[in-house]
Image: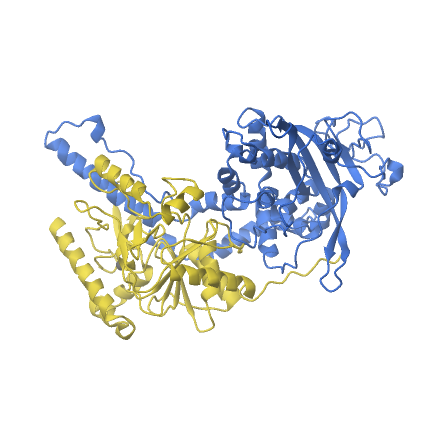
Chain colours: A blue, B yellow
Amino acid sequence: MYVAVKGGERAIAAAHELLARRGRGDRAVPALESDQVRDQLGVLVSRVMNEGSLYDPDLAARAIVQAQGDALEAVTLLRTYRTTLPRYGATVALDTAGLPSERRVSATFKDLPGGQQLGATFDYTHRLLTDAADDEPAGEGLGTGLRPARPAEAPAAADGHLDARMPRISDLLGAEALLEEHVPSPGDPEPADLTREPTIFPMSRAERLQALARGDEGFLLSLGYSTQRGYGRTHPFVGEVRVGEVEVEFVAPETGEALPIGRIEVTECQMVNQFVGDAVTPPQFTRGYGLAFGRAERKAMSMSLVDRALRADEFGERRVGPAQDEEFVLAHSDAVEATGFVEHLKLPHYVDFQAELVLIRQLRAVHRQRDRAGHETTAGDRVGQSDSIGGTP
Amino acid sequence: MTLPRIEYNHAYLDEQTKRTIRRALLKAVAIPGFQVPFASREVPMPRGWGTGGVQVTAAVIGAGDTLKVIDQGADDTTNAVSIRRFFERVAGAATTTDTGEATVIQTRHRIPETPLAEGQIMVYQVPIPEPLRFLEPRETETRRMHALQDYGLIYVKLYEDIARFGRIATTYAYPVIVNGRYLMDPSPTPSFDNPKLHRSPALHLYGAGREKRIYAVPPYTDVESLGFEDHPFEPQRFSQPCAICGSTGVYLDEVVLDDRGGAMYVCSDTDHCERTAAAPAAAAAAAAERAPSRRAGAYERAHSTRMHTFDEQEGAHA
Ligand SMILES: [Zn+2]
């Protein structure tokens, strides 16, 4: 019996061998290549890049394959690699007004400078599971977004790409001072980096946004949803959601000039929320902001809802919902941390459990003696579950 | 398509990160029991599986060190094996299961039975570093309470135990006051192990990776387990010896033998058990003479006094 805990080393090796076999599946089926994942599971790749805090579709795709499709496992792999990379500094702030948008929708205005553009979206597709073999003829398919009617072309201006500069909705409202200004922190310092500096509450908004960008999509979705159902209501409107590629610039210390270092695809959401104002300040709409790598609309929208909810103190709002509670949200939004700690319950805890066993037997022995001695047991004396200050580790 | 080649630094963490962690460790040693925030990095195991301990070990381990890794007191539990192999692989570390031979001991949930010596470093994997966390969930609040040494809440909790159960019903993660100042969670070691911390000649380092905190108990520091005058701290006791080696006064695991209540009790510390079983007749003598030169006399006396008291109590109960 005691031998059962021995031989850990061999057991681990055997388990990993089995894992590899299960992951490979039927060898008659060709092995999944990471470039297939990168190109054909782009939404998943975006999620892994976001929560992994690393823009690299190739590595994210490799992580997804290695993780056998477990998104959080893939995120963990990506972060574990990312943390070993040197950090050279912060880029110039992205100019999302200048990004030629593949997709841009606003729920607040019917028409706006630059126009609306549906782009690649699941919106308005019919969510019908179809046979993968069904090709969809142009214009008459089920609209499942499964198969392109035509081979991919350069998504050029011919496709209706709007190359005119599209001012952000927030800038349009801002021109009339209807929307709170977007003011950088005093001195416009380099943004803090949660992955390189200790986490201390309360956080700056930049740190909060970084934490949200790394946060679990599902968790943020639920929190954002909760604000819509009254737990910290913010009366949101989608000012704008846009998806597109944007140039990243970096100021090289040698030249002092901003140089383009590459392009990344991002999804941005500007949420316009209920106005605030008082006797001194005229009423203004407030905003929540979300930015995510790749195609990640749900993530960017959820993020902007939670960002706005977390600004409760700033606007003198009463905190009534979990989404408004900075420590609650940010301490629990990181799925890598959450899954690690939840899953660590699988690890042996028999030392602490033994301590509890010893105690509960002692307590029960005392109880029995008392009963035998003829004392009447009152409800208040009843032995309940013991409690540890440290909790279950 | 050519993929970028993935390479990792020697000992996994880069030197810059190790220096950051060492700075946090120095601060922790300078303020015993105080939780120092640090920028916890990812390591190749999940959060909650010892990432804090792994970072601390990676930051302190050197070429001349010998590493021992235990989980639940045992060297061969799967997570201990996994962490030990990690350091063998990335740091080329010499490893051992012998407590006396180890210079760095990374642990989860136990302090070895073999008395620790000067120059040894214990590295604890800590899940929740904040002893007040389950009484006050907010970090901003608990930080204030530590600053003001406002520890009333924890005494209320212990008092409530006594009111409800007739005794303090905390068996692990039993809170201590370090150096007469900071309230500290000794990590979820059983309260049985708490006395081993008091004036220990070894350096005790605590790493909480997910919670991003480091704290320490330097050698020969007072570590007092909380209690009341009429209900003083009482470590756990076992009424039977180890079924394998016959040791008494050690922490035992209960091994369930059947579904009719049959059980045997064996040492949780596998290294201690194996060595004691190998030399049953001379067990006590062997333990005493294993490393006398490296052990401080004061500690040895304190330790044997404790064991003596322990046996007396056990006798009284039997
Ligand atoms: Zn034994």
Q: Is residue B318 visible?
A: no
Q: Is residue A38 left or right of residue B262?
A: right
Q: Is residue A234 left or right of residue A350?
A: right
Residue at the image point whose x is 63% and y is 60% from the top: A86
Q: Nearer the viewer, residue B281 or A389?
A: A389
Question: Which residue reaches farthest left?
Answer: A373
Relative height, residue A160 to residue A206 (above, below):
above
Rendered residue at 40%/67% (across/down): B96
* Image quadrant where residue A151 sits: top right
Measured along the vertical axis of the image, is residue A115 above or below residue A43?
Answer: above
Residue A282 versus residue A386: which sits nearer the camera?
A282
Q: Nearer the viewer, residue B263 or B282?
A: B282
Residue A286, percent across and down?
64, 32
Question: Where, quadrant-wise, is the N terminus of chain B in this rendering?
Answer: bottom right
- In x, y percent, where is residue B299? 24, 66
Query: What is the x, y in percent for residue B187?
Result: 36, 51
**Where is ligand 1, by quadrant?**
bottom left
Residue appearing at x 20%, y 31% in the figure: A381
